[in-house]
Amino acid sequence: MAITKQYLKSKPVCKVTFSILAEDAKKVSVVGTFNDWNAKAAPLKKLKNGTFKGTVDLDQDNSYEFKYIVDGAFINDDAADAYVWNDFAAADNGVVTV
């Protein structure tokens, strides 16, 4: 799993690329506070090597909770900037800070 950040000079936006290796998965998306936890808002595209990858534009100077949904199962990213407990899910969520 990996997260890469590309800050734009022209506006206060960071292009955050999320990637997760899930060779046998059929459907992967990234959900979080940036898209109201909507699984359809940020589907990831499967690459030939079995990695799913996608980019989301996030406003700078913010932190966002997120998780991956891999064939219906919620997965944290071990490359997250931090983790925070979520009472609703009764689990930790990954945090990305831009």
Image (cartoon, grey):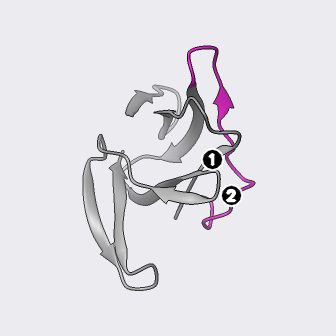
Q: Which residue is mark 1?
A: 29
* Residue drawn at x 60%, y 65% as measured from the top left: 37
Q: Earlier in the sequence, mark 2 or mark 1?
A: 1
Residue placed furthest toward the right: 40
Specify start and end residues of the magenta stretch as a single range.
Answer: 35-50
- The image shows residue 55 at horizontal and vertical percentages of 58, 33
Residue placed furthest toward the top: 48
Instruction: State the quadrant of the N terminus.
Output: top left
Vertical order, 24 against 58 (above or below): above
Question: How far apart are the alpha carbons under marks 2 and 1?
Answer: 6 Å
Amino acid type, callout 2: Ala
Amino acid type, callout 1: Ser
* Residue drawn at x 40%, y 29% as measured from the top left: 4
- Residue 39 is labelled as 2
Q: Are marks 2 and 1 in contact (CB under 8 Å)?
A: yes
In front: 6, or 31?
31
- The image shows residue 3 at horizontal and vertical percentages of 39, 34
In front: 26, or 37?
26
Vertical order, 87 against 7 (above or below): below
